[in-house]
Image (spheres, rainbow, N blue to C red):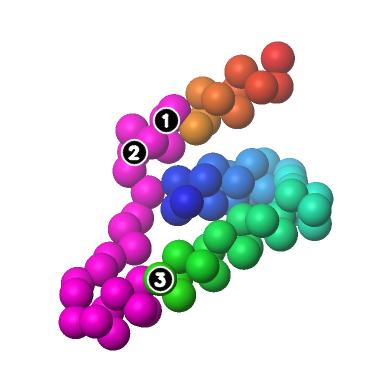
């Protein structure tokens, strides 16, 4: 999820900060992000350690390649 957010932010930066996603496409990502944060809080409530990690560079590279190929 975080990798996807980073790549979308990079695309937005290329367009002067304009979100490249339509509200229809943005909504599921927002919903999933909220769900993941909620799940994290529930796991921590149970006394378990849970981390929302930052994007992995390898994952970012794969997503960037997918975005490049989708533009062709």
Secondary structure found at label 3: helix
Look at the image and give the residue range highlighted in magenta. Answer: 40-62
Q: Separation of disc 3 and disc 2 at Cα? A: 24 Å
Q: Identify the residue under disc 2.
A: 57
Q: Residue, x 24% and y 82% (percent of image)?
A: 46
Secondary structure found at label 1: helix
CB atoms of marks 2 and 1 within 8 Å: yes
Towards the viewer: 23 or 40: 40
Q: Residue, x 61% and y 18% (percent of image)?
A: 69
Q: Identify the residue under disc 1.
A: 61
**Which corner quadrant of the image does residue 48 belong to?**
bottom left
CB atoms of marks 3 and 1 within 8 Å: no
Looking at the image, is 10 positioned above or below residue 23? above
Q: Residue, x 45% and y 75% (percent of image)?
A: 38
Residue 59, percent across and down? Answer: 38, 36
Q: Separation of disc 3 and disc 1 at Cα? A: 27 Å
Looking at the image, is 15 positioned above or below residue 51? above
């Amino acid at each position: 999820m975080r990798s996807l957010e980073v790549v979308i932010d990079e695309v937005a930066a290329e367009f002067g900060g304009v979100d490249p996603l339509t509200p229809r496409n943005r909504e599921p990502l927002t919903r999933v992000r909220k769900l993941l944060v909620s799940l994290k809080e529930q796991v921590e409530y149970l006394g378990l350690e849970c981390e929302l990690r930052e994007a992995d560079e390898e994952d970012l590279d794969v997503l960037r390649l997918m975005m490049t190929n989708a533009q062709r």
